[in-house]
Amino acid sequence: METPDTFFVNDAWAQEAGIELLEVSAGKAKVRLRIAGWHKNSHGTVHGGAIFTLADTAFALASNSHGFPAAAINAHIFYVKAATSGILYAVAEEFSLNPKIATYTVIVTDDEGEKIALFEGMVYRKTPGR
């Protein structure tokens, strides 16, 4: 299995989006995105797809942190506040872990700690012998 650093570096979409890995441990991950002009939609706010990508990257890192491949089978997001500039952070935490299924909650905040979005996701874990 890849290390978290290698897993992240091999995520071409996250790299192109400008996402930075801050930390990862068993069942947890934190990433950030420095907002650039190309992250914005026609309203001048950060595009929902950019916010989803940030949260999904934290989700992927946390869910793959146990040494077994994990693939998303469900994910949804609630956008609660618009962001226009600065830095966004996404912190993923494991909510439940079973041999084949695990669930995660990701909170996206701005650089002042204001909540921007809530993301929830579920993965299928490819554990051996199960």
Image (cartoon, helix red, strand yellow):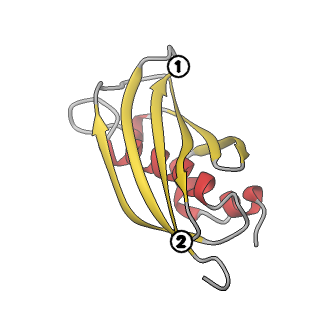
Disc 1 secondary structure class: loop
Which mark's residue is nearer the viewer, 2 or 1? 2
Residue that appears at 78% across and 62% down: 3
Location of residue 34 in the rendering, given as x and y in whole percent from the top left corner: 54, 32
Q: Position of residue 103 (x, y in %)?
A: 47, 54
Where 99 sits versus 130, above or below?
A: above
| Residue 44 in the image: above or below residue 78 | above
> Label 2, on which residue?
100
Residue in the picture at 67% in, 57% down: 8
Q: Is residue 51 left or right of residue 67?
A: left
| Amino acid at pointer 2 | Lys
Q: Earlier in the sequence, mark 2 or mark 1?
A: 2
For this rendering, which residue is in front, 47 or 23? 23
Which mark, residue 111? 1
Quadrant in which the C terminus is drawn: bottom right
Under tag 2, what secondary structure?
A: loop
- Foreground pick, 16 / 81: 81
Whether residue 69 is situated above or below residue 39 in the rendered picture: below
**Of 38 and 49, which appears nearest the observer?**
49
Quarter of the figure that contains the N terminus:
bottom right
Q: Which quarter of the figure has residue 80?
A: top left
Please provide percent x and percent y for residue 102: 51, 59
Q: Are marks 2 and 1 in contact (CB under 8 Å)?
A: no
Q: Which mark is residue 120?
A: none
Position in image of residue 2 (x %, y %): 76, 68
Looking at the rendered structure, the kind of residue marked 1 is Asp
User: Badge 2: few (under 14), some or many (20 or more) residues near its Cα, within 10 Å?
Assistant: few
8 lies left or right of 46: right
Query: How far is mark 2 from mark 1, CA to CA?
Result: 35 Å
